Amino acid sequence: MPKLNENYQNLKESYLFVEIAHRVAKYAEANPDKKIIRLGIGDVTLPLEPLAVAGLHEGVDAMTSTETFKGYGPEQGYDFLRQAVVDYYAENGISIQADDVFISDGAKSDTGNIGDLFAKDNIVLIPDPVYPVYVDTNVMTGREIIYIDANAENNFLPMPDKHVHADLIYICSPNNPTGAAYNKEQLKAWVDYALENDAVIFYDSAYEAFITDPELPRSIFAVEGAKKCAIEFCSLSKTAGFTGTRCGYTVVPQELVFKASNGEEMSVNAMWKRRQTTKFNGTSYIVQKGAAAIFTKEGMAQCRENIAYYQKNAKTISDVLSKKGIRFFGGKNSPYIWFECPKGMDSWDFFDYLLNNAQVVGTPGAGFGKNGQNFFRLTSFGTHESTKEAMERFEKLF
């Protein structure tokens, strides 16, 4: 009989959002007359930007002619989109090369798959609370995971401990689920730590487009030395509403080189290219045409309009929490609002309380780690009308 990967036995029984869906479905079945408002999963509600749609149509039209038809494309992405990403970084004052950029179907896939490049015996440092994919993919591999506390006392922005050694480090900024964002000095401390420990930072910047504070970096490569120790993941899911269209990109600098046990140098960029050409057939040409339209001046302006819409929702949520004296984080440079559960409730009890008494669905902080036990996440991705109604219901409860 085959030997299975028994590390799967160490995973939690149910993925967080599966459990949420189960509880909501059970309540809806018992209360068919109740209108449920969902501010839990971070899925967008606005349609794609007009220029993105036009780009998708251009891609489709190309498939109708022998002269322009596209079959298998380059696994690392078409040059036109890779260069568009390079130009986008340049607009933010950051220089990268097209060969550093790998187009994918989203940051979730790449943050989950990047572990393929690293041996099982690496020590992984993950903040708690955290996006579950970081933890689960390393549990599947059987790596040792050490956690660093993100909590209210450090504003959910933990800093490196020089007495703790790690080889692989996960950072998400602006953070999911807490909405907290590192400043440049704080990120420099992480880069310095990684360089001192010969470690690699996996930097998830999926929500960088929501940063409004000009003092906050939108890429870890704004920090000197980061190209020698960091890989950056980004996504158009929230920037451009591509949650269903699926497109993202990962930046693996050429400077990221380490010595193998036999003394030979190995390029992480070359390894990732080899991994992708083996296990990934590339993002479709049609989707990449839509994505390229996003990176034009007009396309980014349309994206900013949608982001501003969601930011208004975040303010609606934040204003009610402030009015009620409930401590919260995020909401300004992030689409997520992370707040302390009222009345001393733990997060799953509060989830049930909010669902049963206000018919509002959020995300229990406990699903992101032990430090989320008494916190709760709401997202700003609903409509203006649903967000306003949800917070009116919320306000009446407290």
Image: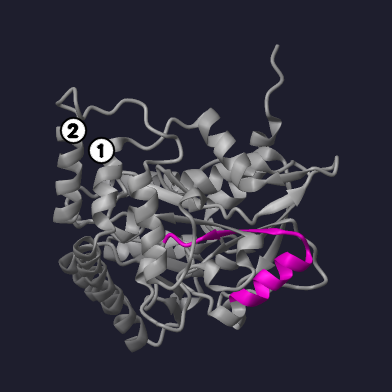
Q: Is residue 316 left or right of residue 88?
A: left
Residue closer to the observer: 250 or 391? 250
Q: Is residue 289 visible?
A: yes
Q: Which residues are magenta?
A: 187-206
Q: Is residue 310 left or right of residue 268?
A: left
Q: Position of residue 147 (x, y in %)?
A: 69, 62
Q: Is residue 15 above or below residue 202?
A: above
User: The residue tagged with tag 2: helix, strand or loop?
Assistant: helix
Q: Position of residue 328 (x, y in %)?
A: 44, 79
Of the two numbered discs 2 and 1 on the same chain, state the one appearing first in sequence: 2
Q: Is residue 214 left or right of residue 268?
A: left
In the rendered structure, does residue 195 fall within the stretch colored magenta?
yes
What residue is shown at x 34% (from left), y 53% (from top)? 237
Which residue sits furthest front?
Answer: 67
What residue is shown at x 67% (from left), y 76% (from top)? 189
C-alpha separation, residue under disc 2 versus residue under disc 1 = 8 Å
- Please give the residue where the numbered disc 1 appears in the rendered image: 286
User: The residue tagged with tag 1: helix, strand or loop?
Assistant: helix
Q: Which mark is residue 66?
A: none
In the rendered structure, does residue 47 fall within the stretch colored magenta?
no
Q: Position of residue 255 (x, y in %)?
A: 64, 56
- Residue 391 quadrant: bottom left
Residue type at the position of mark 2: Ala
Residue closer to the observer: 377 or 305? 305
Question: Badge 2: few (under 14), some or many (20 or more) residues near its Cα, within 10 Å?
Answer: some
Q: Is residue 354 above or below residue 16?
A: below
- Please give the residue where the numbered disc 2 appears in the rendered image: 62
| Contact, mark 2 vs mark 1 (Cβ under 8 Å) | yes
Q: Position of residue 125 (x, y in %)?
A: 69, 59
Q: Is residue 188 above or below residue 251?
A: below
What residue is shown at x 50% (from left), y 48% (from top)? 99
